[in-house]
Image (cartoon, rainbow, N blue to C red):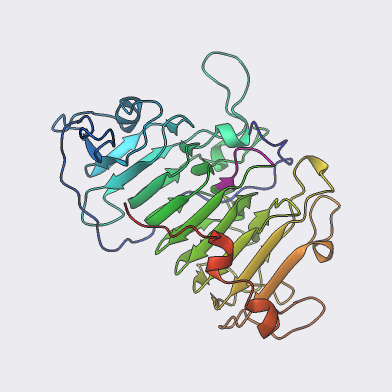
Amino acid sequence: MAAHRRRSALTPGSRRAVTAGAAALLTTATVWTSGPASGTEAATTLTVAKDGSGQYSTVQAAVDAVPAGNTARVVVSVKPGTYRETVKIPSTKQNVTLQGSGSSRNDTVIVYDNASGTRKPDGSGTYGTGGSATVAAEANGFQARNLTISNDFDEAAHQNMSGLQAVALRTAADKVFLDSVIVTGDQDTLLLDTASKATLGRVHMTNSYVVGNVDFIFGRATAVIDRSVITLKKRWDGSSAGYIAAPSTAADRKGFLITGSTVSGDVSASSFHLGRPWHAGGDASLDPMATFRGTTLSSAVRSAPWTDMSGFSWKDDRFAEYKNTGPGSGTASTDRPQLTDSQAADQEIADWLAGWTPSAS
């Protein structure tokens, strides 16, 4: 990860599993068009198909065709199939949407298996955590919908490797909208980051699945995960233990808000923490933040759901719950801070998005 010095590897998780999807979002393909006479670019759709029936046969080729500095929405419509490739949307290519055109989120899969410790083909070293991402979105206005993004790195087969973190999706941009997607991996599945420590990076994820086992929602973005399913996985050796969120929030920012969602998975009872504070690079000025509210928690969640990390106490940072339900929920205590109604009124989705209204434009 170029922006952070990543923590040391932890015991990894088990192999990938793609969760069942739901309704599709369809698009009609058009050719690339120049904008109207007024100078405002028309929205454009580029099609990708493995069988050659689209304009491009790889997702990256379609992204490469987007002009640098574009302002209008460009939809990369990906036909059903498994696309084994890495995809990068650079910061110069704003307002790109990756959209599966199948009948469910399972039909279109972008997958690769790089890990932090995987050596680059050119011999220049290893990828690092951020560099391991199957899809890396660095441009503002990025959207993804109706598809699966996966990292299927085989941890069991690489136990001698140093650096087992393997990211499926990395965002490092503002106004990122993830709608009806599956993001699946083991350790460090979903990296919600910003372009720099001083830069705002808002993310809204809704109607989606995130699958993993160790710190699998992490980073310094101001991110909302709404009406989604967080699926807990066993580790590579079949054991159950893990951490959902590892925020690395700047002191003047909001971190992660998980709201109206469900935490579940085929793991042992009382084996997962809701989260822990990631002070990236040992930066004591950070103030990691995560709130779970109105969310159904399975029995997998520990009764003391927060824990320390790398010498930093979670009690010195911002971790709380509000009106969660399910067998993994609990009442207020020193180990389980609960927001008051007044505090919760300032921790709504609108407070996180700060004037941005996500839409599938």
Looking at the picture, does residue 61 appear above or below residue 166? above
Q: Pinpoint residue 153: horizontal percent, then vertical percent.
A: 50, 39
Taking the spot 61% from the left edge, 47% from the top edge, the residue there is 200
Taking the spot 44% from the left edge, 60% from the top edge, the residue there is 357
Looking at the picture, does residue 283 appear above or below residue 93? below
Regarding residue 187, the answer to whether it shows in the image is yes
* Residue 106 part of the magenta segment: no
Q: Is residue 43 left or right of residue 240?
A: left
Location of residue 360 by image quarter:
bottom left
Taking the spot 57% from the left edge, 83% from the top edge, the residue there is 325
Q: Pinpoint residue 129: horizontal percent, then vertical percent.
A: 61, 36
**Closer-to-camera residue (209/214):** 209
**Closer-to-camera residue (153/83):** 83
Q: Pinpoint residue 332: horizontal percent, then vertical percent.
A: 74, 84
Q: Pinpoint residue 274: horizontal percent, then vertical percent.
A: 65, 66
Quadrant, the N terminus = top right
Taking the spot 52% from the left edge, 46% from the top edge, the residue there is 174
Looking at the picture, does residue 83 appear above or below residue 239? above
Query: Bounds of the magenta span?
Result: 191-197
**Residue most toward the front?**
38
Total labels drawn:
0
**Closer-to-camera residue (325/194):** 194
Regarding residue 234, the answer to whether it shows in the image is no
Looking at the picture, does residue 294 appear above or below residue 30? below
* Residue 195 part of the magenta segment: yes
